[in-house]
Image: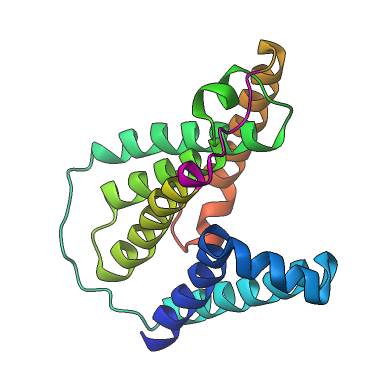
């Protein structure tokens, strides 16, 4: 459990550093350069992510709550929407990106909430609760910085986001989830 928690602290610590320590971040970039900063940030984030994965197996699997079987269908729909939001963050902006303002954060929060809806074991609650808390905290930080998010673009870009998001969802749901999480969904 210790490696799992340590991984979460490192991973989210790096991400929250960029959200709240803007002055320190700028000073560090000024000192070592943008490329080395991004490399260091990536290495630290990856180290945290690896520790989360390694620590997952030894984390507490005690059940805190169980939900009815039908809630998984709600979770599937929410995760599909989350994937579309994630795609909208990376394709040229459309109406979805404009409405969500920060579609990646919205997607992460929705993805985490959906997983909390159907996973009531301690390690899942800690993992997905951490992602949800991060999404909320980072959205507050973004708003405080005055970042208004992405401006809306043409609807044709939404079509791209929906197709990319749906394809990614299908790939994960029908194939990848069993390898990523050890649980086949379908």
| Image position, residue 171 (x, y; %) | 61, 42
The reply to whether residue 150 is visible in this rendering is yes
Who's the residue at 53% across and 80% down the image?
A: 51
Who's the residue at 22% across and 42% down the image?
A: 69
Q: Main secondary structure of the magenta part?
A: loop
Q: State which quadrant residue 186 falls in.
A: top left
The reply to whether residue 57 is visible in this rendering is no
Who's the residue at 81% across and 65% down the image?
A: 34
| Image position, residue 150 (x, y; %) | 62, 30
Q: Left or right: 44 with respect to 131?
A: right
Boundaries of the magenta span = 142-152
| Image position, residue 92 (x, y; %) | 74, 27
Who's the residue at 28% across and 78% down the image?
A: 60
Q: Between residues 39 and 49, which one lies in front from this camera angle?
A: 39
- Verify whether residue 145 appears in magenta: yes
| Image position, residue 96 (x, y; %) | 56, 22
């Amino acid at each position: 459990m210790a490696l799992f928690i340590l991984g979460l602290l490192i991973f989210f610590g790096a991400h929250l550093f960029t959200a709240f320590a803007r002055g320190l971040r700028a000073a560090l970039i000024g000192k070592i350069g943008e490329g080395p900063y991004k490399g260091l940030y990536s290495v630290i984030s990856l180290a945290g992510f690896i520790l989360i994965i390694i620590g997952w197996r030894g984390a507490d699997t005690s059940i805190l709550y169980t939900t009815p079987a039908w809630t998984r269908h709600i979770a599937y729909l929410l995760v599909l929407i989350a994937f579309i939001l994630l795609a909208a963050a990376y394709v040229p902006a459309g109406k979805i990106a404009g409405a969500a303002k920060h579609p990646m954060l919205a997607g992460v929060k929705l993805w985490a909430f959906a997983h909390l809806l159907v996973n009531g074991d301690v390690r899942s609650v800690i993992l997905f609760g951490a992602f949800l808390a991060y999404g909320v905290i980072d959205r507050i930080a973004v708003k405080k910085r005055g970042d208004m998010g992405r401006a809306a673009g043409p609807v044709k870009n939404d079509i791209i986001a929906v197709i990319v998001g749906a394809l990614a969802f299908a790939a994960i749901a029908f194939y990848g989830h069993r390898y990523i999480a050890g649980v086949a969904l379908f």
